[in-house]
Amino acid sequence: MDFRLSQDQEALREGIRVFCAGRFPTERLPELGKQGTLDRELWRELAEMGVFSLRRPEQEGGVGLGCAEAVLVFAELGRRLVPGPLVWTQLAAEWLPPAASGERVVTGLDRANGEPHLVEHLAVADAVLVLRQDGVHRVDPQTLRAEAVATPLDPLTPVHHVLELAAGERLAGPEAATRLRLEGAALAAAQLLGIAEATQELATAYASQRHQFGRAIGSFQAVKHLLADAYVRQELARAAVYAAGATLDDPEVGDVARAVSAAKLVAGEAALANARTCIQVHGGMGYTWEVPAHFYLKRAWVLENAFGTAAHHADDVATGLATRA
């Protein structure tokens, strides 16, 4: 399988990267974290960039691309910690056209994750997509009995604890729910890849600028080892995430579930380890609100539990390997 990007894919990635760098600069993270709200105008701009309609057919107003391109886009969104229920809104675009155009914000809940039922950005959501054992359901946010979490782990991801969940409208059957879980896990893994890349770059840049004992700290062997390990982790994560996207587009090349679970595991481990390394390289400053390193670590913790925990995906990979053996 050839993971080298085509010219069109590179152009797509670069376009999203430039847009996110301009609209979601790292310097704004503390400000966005204190606001805790979703900017509807920015949400519509994301839609205009094709983020939510990326995988919809062209005859339905979409871009007509696949999961291989979607993971490229979501890695860039993860790199800049773009806030909002990005994955859920793209998944919902299949049934809710206003979600694809950015006119509706859709969040979601996967019942397979078990208790507690936590829903992100519920206060600004126009619909809630619920994945149940019997299929995919749409629920009106106004019908939910939920309590806001006073201090969410990620300041950019406000969450509500759902105490009572209405049945809602059934949109599709169990096969669709299974497919959306896999697609959602792949897109979450792509965001984790973006975090692994961004934190590695932040740590390397700081190590090149920060001087101690008359020389850049990046010249010290111990720091070099930290940065080298971070680079290796991001490369492994990139290969796993690209493989998951390609396998979702062409299931004949491999086991889709295993590829997605492997991507979620490898990218999750890379994001968490690289975020911790970024904090460590920054030293005492790494623990302050002004340095963005902690935002990446917190988002990585949130994403690691989205669409299946690390333990869940590890069990799936182990079961699949044992069955094949």
Image (cartoon, rainbow, N blue to C red):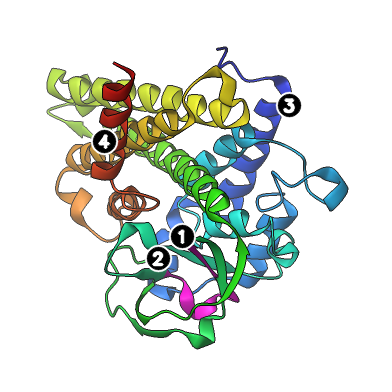
The residue stretch that appears in magenta: 120-132
Q: Is residue 268 above or below residue 32?
A: above
Asked if the residue under mark 2 is in contact with the one under mark 4, i.e. CB atoms within 8 Å, the reply is no
- Residue at the limit of the structure toward the top, as seen here: 1
Image position of 209 (left or right of 124): left
Q: Secondary structure at mark 2?
A: loop
Residue at image mark 4: 314
Q: Quadrant of residue 88?
A: bottom right
Q: Nearer the viewer, mark 3 or mark 1?
A: 3
Q: Secondary structure at mark 4?
A: helix
Query: Which residue type does callout 2 highlight?
Result: Thr
Q: Residue at x 87, y 47 (%)?
A: 59
Say which mark, if any, is on residue 8.
Answer: 3
Q: Secondary structure at mark 3?
A: helix
Q: Exactly how many numbered labels are in the figure?
A: 4
Dot placed on the residue nearer the N-terminal end, 3 or 1: 3
Residue at image mark 2: 157
Q: Quadrant of residue 274?
A: top left
Asked if the residue under mark 2 is in contact with the one under mark 3, i.e. CB atoms within 8 Å, the reply is no
Of residues 57 and 207, the one nearer the viewer is 57
User: At which x and y percent is residue 233?
Assistant: 31, 25
The N terminus sits in image quarter: top right
| Residue 306 shows in the view | yes
The residues bearing labels 1 and 2 have C-alpha atoms spaced at a distance of 15 Å
Q: Is residue 310 magenta?
A: no
